[in-house]
Image: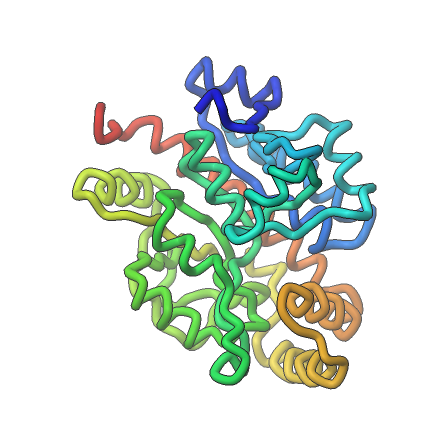
Amino acid sequence: MTHLPLHYAPEVAEARASGTPLVALESTIITHGMPFPRNVETARAVEADIRAAGAVPATMAVLDGTLHVGLTPDQLDRLAGLDDVAKLSRADLAACLARGGHGATTVAATMIAAHLAGIEVFATGGIGGVHRGAELSFDISADLQELSRTPVTVVAAGAKAILDLPKTYEVLETLGVPVIAMGQDMLPAFWSRRSDIPAPLRMDSAAEVARAHRMRARIGLSGGQLVTNPIPEHDEIPQSDLAPLIDRALADAEAAGIAAKAVTPYLLDRIYALTQGRSLEANIALVRNNALLAAAIARELGNEPSMTG
């Protein structure tokens, strides 16, 4: 792996040398997911949460054609201030590296980067999935395929609620991705603790998730796991409040001709406006909650022997 355009932040390099658990983090939350300065504040808070929970954060991003595994405070500030940052997934990660560009990693690209760096757990807000109307647009996130092929456990508050949730989870089932609800029998719905979709799997501890992660490797199954972690109760926005606002945002996006990678940021911005900022506060709370669970899983993986251990 020494020939890869990969650079470890000093904190990450030290953790690798000492065997300290690592948790991968995406960077689109900084460049495309939240307004300034909340984006930088949240990124720093999530990293601090992971450290406090006994692990080391590794925020992924491409700067000047180098894939950074962990960002220094100066690099995080620089990323937040750049105007020409690509939103990277599997299809364009290599091109950005080859061209010497700058890029923020989506769920799919972060999973790839984490696997290259030997990191087994990744915390995010919500995964992408099947967009509403996908039977006409064929708009399906690359995150779903990535979960089926890259052996990283992803902790999220479910798929983003702006998506077609039933179709998203049907695709994950078809792809053979384990979808685990943490501590409840129904899948969460991002800003809301519960959807009306029963969870295919339920687990109640980080240790269970770690054992399942190791077992997949032992029996030769490819791909990762999706751990859906419900937002804390006092931070949630009930589905009954959100549903009409999501419908309105979707109608606005269609009227404005928004498509492809621009859809999700547009919808999140519209829902932020329609909820008068409440969605952003919920988003921050769920990301931080997911980071804590991811750190616990990373610690437990250190207690579970690997396939070669």
Q: Nearer the viewer, residue 68 or 212?
A: 68
Above-or-below relation of 212 to 136 = above
Percent of width and height locating residue 78: 79, 35
Answer with the quarter of the image where residue 161 lies: bottom right
| Identity of the residue furthest to the left in this view | 219
Measured along the vertical axis of the image, is residue 277 above or below residue 284?
A: below
Q: Is residue 169 left or right of residue 37?
A: left
Quarter in which the C terminus is drawn: top left
Instruction: Tell me which residue sits at (74%, 85%) in the image.
Output: 255
Quadrant (top left, top right, bottom left, bottom right) of the N terminus: top left
Total tally of numbered discs in the picture = 0
Q: Is residue 187 left or right of residue 81?
A: left
176 or 44: nearer the eye?
Answer: 176
What x and y, as percent, mark residue 115?
42, 37
Which color mode does the image show? rainbow
Using the image as rendered, state which of residue 306 and residue 194 is in the foreground: 306
Image quarter of residue 271: bottom right
- What residue appears at the point 51 percent right and 58 percent down from the top-left corner? 127
Q: Is residue 15 above or below residue 210?
A: above
Name the quadrant containing residue 80: top right
| Residue 205 horizontal side relative to residue 103, left or right | left
Judging depth in this view, the residue of 7 and 216 nearest the camera is 7
Q: Quick check: 251 left or right of 186?
A: right
Q: Position of residue 56 (x, y in %)?
A: 54, 27
Where is residue 204 shown, x and y percent of the image? 34, 50
Residue at 78%, 47% (x, y): give it: 84
